[in-house]
Amino acid sequence: MTELRKLYQQIMLDHNKQPRNYGRLENANRDQEGHNPLCGDRLHLYLHVDGERILDIRFEGSGCAISRASASLMTAALKGGTIADAEAYFADFHAMTTSSPDAPVDTDRLGKLAIFAGVREFPMRIKCATLPWHTLRAALKGTDTTVTTE
Ligand code: ZN
């Protein structure tokens, strides 16, 4: 767990300093807002989807370090992949963040996303980590209302 914690701090720092895929996506054909009232995180997610493939994905917003790093890592993981890949990542990420704090984490499957296993010890922060994912899901479904984690 100490290895994962060290990695967590490095990746959080890196993705907050230099968030990946940050900014508006001009040719987006899906976009979705998400809000986590518990923490005050706000996120705007943009996608350019062609058939089954996510050609591009970007985000904007203001939020805490966890929500920003989560959005950054999520967009990096999903860009260029298929919608089915995104759904599979969502399912694995959701299963991880809702498991008990000492449950094993599949780092092979989740890659860097596995660092968010650390939030399981802080129930208040789980919604910060999952906000980008819930926003993604709504964007892929094409709902119009703002997603909230409540
Ligand atoms: Zn937050």
Image (cartoon, grey):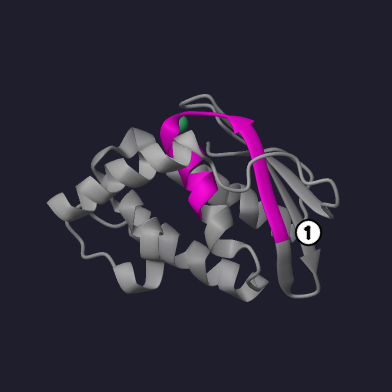
| Residue under the image location 47 percent in, 34 percent down | 17
Residue 50 relative to residue 15: left or right: right
Task: Judge whether 138 appears above or below 104 on screen.
Answer: above
Q: On screen, 92 above or below 12?
A: below
Q: Is residue 65 left or right of residue 135?
A: left
Q: Position of residue 76 (x, y in %)?
A: 55, 57
Q: Is residue 71 magenta?
A: yes
Magenta region includes residue 107: no
Q: Residue 140, located in which quarter of the rendered image?
A: bottom right
Which image quadrant shows ligand 1?
top left
Q: Does dot 1 land on a helix, a strand or a loop?
A: strand
List the single residue furthest toward the left: 2
Q: Give amino acid for label 1.
A: His
Left or right: residue 149 versus residue 94 is: right
The residue closer to the viewer here, 104 or 15, is 15
Q: Is residue 93 above or below residue 53?
A: above
Q: Is 117 located above or below residue 39 in the figure?
A: below
Q: Residue at x 53, y 43 (%)?
A: 131
Q: Work out which residue is located at the far top of the displayed protein and give it.
A: 40
Which residue is painted at 63% across and 32% down in the image? 61
Residue holding disc 1: 48
Residue plotted at (35% across, 50% down): 116
Magenta part of the chain = 56-73
Pointer 1 residue Cβ closer than 8 Å to ligand 1: no
Crowding around mark 1 (Cα neighbors within 10 Å: few <14, some 14 to 19, many 20+) is many
Let me know if residue 67 appears in the view.
no
Q: Seen in the image, is 18 located left or right of residue 92? A: right
Percent across and percent down for residue 79 are 63, 63
Residue 144: tell me if it is visible: yes
The N terminus lies in quadrant: bottom left
Query: x, y percentage for residue 105?
Result: 27, 64
In percent of width and height, residue 73 lies at 49, 52
